[in-house]
Image (cartoon, rainbow, N blue to C red):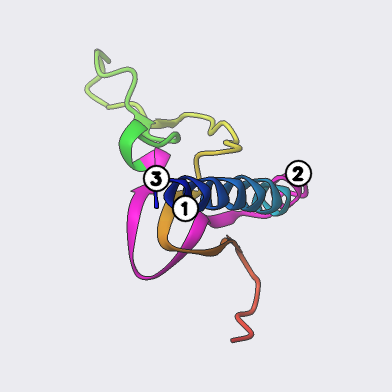
Amino acid sequence: MDTFLIKAAQLILAFAILVIIHEFGHFFFARIFGVKVEKFYIFFDPWIELFKWKPKKYFGGFGKTKNIGNDNTDGESAEPVKKKRKKSFWGDTEYGIGWLPLGGYCKIAGMIDES
């Protein structure tokens, strides 16, 4: 019984590695050509996911306004200056792990769902 569980775990791990490599190919080429990738998931998540992570939610976004020049002597406030947004390769995507180990998916913006 122990060898069966070890072999099953090895099979799931090998399958996960293959799915990651395959889906990363979709992700990589979409980002190279400037297309936004909305989701990158390992395994499927029909209703709930085991793990979900969105980098901008936890590390903050770029492009916030900053008001400089509040110390004007003429009483007028300066216009807010918008910071330049750095183009993020990883930051616009939601990453996750589903619970159904049958594949994975990479949701690319603008793709039509054919199901």
Question: Dot 3: within a 10 Å radius of its alpha carbon, few (fewer than 14), some, or many (20 or more) residues?
Answer: some
- The amino acid marked with disc number 3 is Lys
Q: Position of residue 62 (x, y in %)?
A: 44, 34
Magenta range is: 28-56
Please say whether residue 7 is one of the residues in the magenta stretch.
Answer: no
Q: Which mark is residue 32?
A: 2
Q: Earlier in the sequence, mark 1 or mark 2?
A: 1
- 52 part of magenta stretch: yes
> Which of the two marks, 1 or 2, is nearer to us in this view?
1
Q: Secondary structure at mark 1?
A: helix
Gap in angstroms between the C-alphas marked 1 and 2:
42 Å
Q: How far is mark 1 from mark 3, CA to CA?
A: 36 Å
Q: How far across and down, in percent of the image, does residue 102 sit?
A: 54, 66
- Nearer the observer, 9 or 67: 9
Kindly identify the residue that appears in the image at 56 percent across and 61 percent down. 104
**Is 94 above or below relative to 90?**
below
Q: Residue at x 39, y 45 (%)?
A: 54
Q: Nearer the viewer, residue 84 or 100?
A: 100
Answer with mark 1 or mark 3, whichever residue precedes in sequence. Answer: 1
Instruction: Determine which residue is flagged by label 1.
Output: 4
The quadrant the C terminus occupies is bottom right
Q: Residue 54 — which label?
A: 3
Give left or right: position of 19 versus 8.
right
- Mark 2 / mark 3, whichever is N-terminal: 2
Residue 87 location, x and y as percent?
Answer: 60, 36
